Amino acid sequence: MRPPTPPVALPGPRTLAADLSSVPPGTSVTLRGWVHRRRELAAVTFLVLRDRSGLAQVVVRAGDGQDVPPEETVVEVTGVATANAQAPGGIEVTAPTVAPLTDPARTPPVELWRPALDVALPTLLDHAAVAWRHPAQRARWEVAAASLRGFREVLDAQGFTEVHSPKIVASATESGANVFAVDYFGGPAFLAQSPQFYKQQLVGVFERVYEVGPVFRAEPHDTVRHLAEYVSLDVELGFVHDHRDVLRVLRDVLAGMVAGVHELAAGAVATQGFEVPVVPDEIPVIHFAEALALVGAPADEPDLAPEHERALGRWALAEHGSDFLAVEGFPMAKRPFYTHPQPDDARWSNSFDLLFRGLELVTGGQRLHRHADYVSAITARGEDPAAYATYLEAFEHGMPPHGGFAIGLERWTARLTGAANVREVTLFPRDLHRLVP
Amino acid sequence: MRPPTPPVALPGPRTLAADLSSVPPGTSVTLRGWVHRRRELAAVTFLVLRDRSGLAQVVVRAGDGQDVPPEETVVEVTGVATANAQAPGGIEVTAPTVAPLTDPARTPPVELWRPALDVALPTLLDHAAVAWRHPAQRARWEVAAASLRGFREVLDAQGFTEVHSPKIVASATESGANVFAVDYFGGPAFLAQSPQFYKQQLVGVFERVYEVGPVFRAEPHDTVRHLAEYVSLDVELGFVHDHRDVLRVLRDVLAGMVAGVHELAAGAVATQGFEVPVVPDEIPVIHFAEALALVGAPADEPDLAPEHERALGRWALAEHGSDFLAVEGFPMAKRPFYTHPQPDDARWSNSFDLLFRGLELVTGGQRLHRHADYVSAITARGEDPAAYATYLEAFEHGMPPHGGFAIGLERWTARLTGAANVREVTLFPRDLHRLVP
């Protein structure tokens, strides 16, 4: 191969753009980042430099003898911190030396320097690695990352243990449909649709567990809220009385995610105007049967349609001032076999969906915990308990009453940032039609 | 289905086993957990209760009129905290009421109450969900979970952003071999062998990124250190001078993982006698060419054999008092195309392996960052750059000098806990012969 470029010397300390405002005027500073915007006027060129912390303004005068390379070129700028009330943070850099750290960049496929990233969704997704550089786009992921930290902090503080369960599994037993098949050393295997079975088994070990990881659904629907692969925030805990205890933990988790956003993505929230929800001390709960009546649906509807969810979201906001609403008691017939029935009426279940601004964000509930109940439930669905042997072993050897939930990261982020489509908040989305980039 | 068991009332506060020692004697307490051991003597039965925090001793006298259910049954015990110097923590529970929370448990396939879990590996793995309940086994995962928290804490503090990249990918381009094929809506796809390409592209967005997630290798070797699916701790950062900057971040990360173990898994370390390493302020570095000479290998060997790694581990301990040794400068011919060559001699690379007690734990290094260098490197290997189009787009539009590394969680945990086989520290391992449980 051709000899590579000699390595670039990156000596000395670096000032991040966000820290420039606290540098005393007159100080020499070194910035490193991307040429976000090059604006050439008659006697002066404005170079807006972008780094991981934000933007900084560099003023290049003709007398400085410096070329400003094209936008997105990576540069090192050394100059003098100079007060200017018009500059971001009140400080700009003057009398600079502008040293490119790489070749001049090609013009990006999307105009990253414009305040709004106004491109069609396919363009955004086709050029994801570059489009995510746009501050408005990047802000969305900052919310996602901050939420993840908040999620873990709450659970760590409540005695939960992080676990990692396998994504290649032997059978498609949880739902049967919508699974991806894998060639596993010449034999059949599948991609896990959820860590459900594993997190339950691990309640037998750690009592309280969580996992953040990918789940896979061969989702044949091309909608704004479905992905073939997404990040699931899974929680499961033992020694609950019923699903209401699970819901209480979910409330704390959501409050922690919101706190994480306020603490770690405050800049993103402020610049983009994201409407961060307030999590009430108690999330309002409505029974499925009442919810149907409220939205005027027939009493024998087995599920909530998207328009029902939206109506319930409006109701929760009007009635309880809450962006969140838990609908409990979903019909057993529509829930997985491991769902715990409602004790006083086995048509209904001790499970819930959590709506966030009228969109299903979380599914959770109490699970069966007696081995005999599993055998009955599986048999009643016309399946053979032997197919679930390794899962059921945990229940033969003592499992406490337990339950849990799963939050879809992309739905959470989309709803919080006002994105119309979960694809806009997914770094590299996968769906029926998209496998690249 | 048959009517389920009425839900168990779990009223009132619960005392964890580990907190019993701080309860004033004479206080009424409620414990919940598993019957870890039932030892029946003539006039008294000792019930050792296990919960997520540890073990507690319950003394059941004949006059208490209580049946103690078999081991692993989940129970609620209410009784009186009573001083006894022989009990764990100096407090036991007497005059108990023992209420089973589920049916009597079947005898477990492994004897969980014995101090050591002395079973053959296949038994351990076949009955993983139950075997992980053994305190000695559980302690291993506590080390893993504590390490994960330490890993993230260090990176969060250093301005890194957590990312999640797709695990279903369009091509097997990174190495070609050892990939799992997926049926993706009727078309071909593969499971990602690493987040390498994505984490590099995201350096263009966030400068510093990390990801904890599964990676997949259709590993045809049946060894004690290979898995078909494992948890990779991936880090990538921009604006480095060379791989030595990457190694410095790796040092901090390892120090954080060790701190996490001391802080969060102290009980596991103490009871199991795990030898937690000390991370030196600077990890000793040896060049690949010197390393070959040191172990007496021919100068044209392209890689280090396991016995070489072990010899180098012994040397690092003897010479530098270090459990860690970085071997830098691996031959370019054996490294992936994105590897940055050593500037003064392009036979070698700016990459390294980190050995932990004589076992390769981490691979890392500096990557190419110029688009032209990528085109050359890919072409030189007889491949078509067009096959890497979406990856290379990030480099056309400005990428800083950067590098990163990946730590295998299972190797780290195995080495730290003294496990001979990575399968012993993996919750539900996957390999050539194992797809269940």
Image (tube, coloured by chain):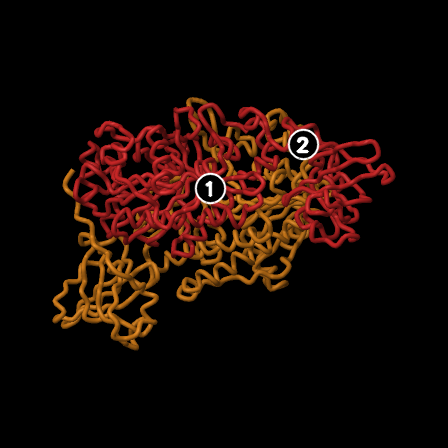
Chain colours: A red, B orange
Judging from the image, mark 2 belongs to the subunit labelled: B
Residue type highlighted by circle 2 = His
- B401 on left or right of B391: right
Q: Mark 2, mark 1: which one is toward the viewer? A: 2
Q: Which residue is mark 1?
A: B214
Residue type highlighted by circle 1 = Pro
SS type, badge 1: strand
Q: Quadrant of the N terminus of chain B?
A: top left
Q: Residue B95's spot in the image, x, y percent?
A: 18, 70
- B393 on left or right of B125: right
Q: Residue B397's spot in the image, x, y percent?
A: 67, 32
Q: Is residue B111 above or below residue B3?
A: below
Judging from the image, mark 1 belongs to the subunit labelled: B
- B375 on left or right of A195: right
Q: Which residue is mark 2?
A: B397
Q: Residue at point 23% right, 71% down?
A: B80
Q: Residue B85's spot in the image, x, y percent?
A: 30, 77
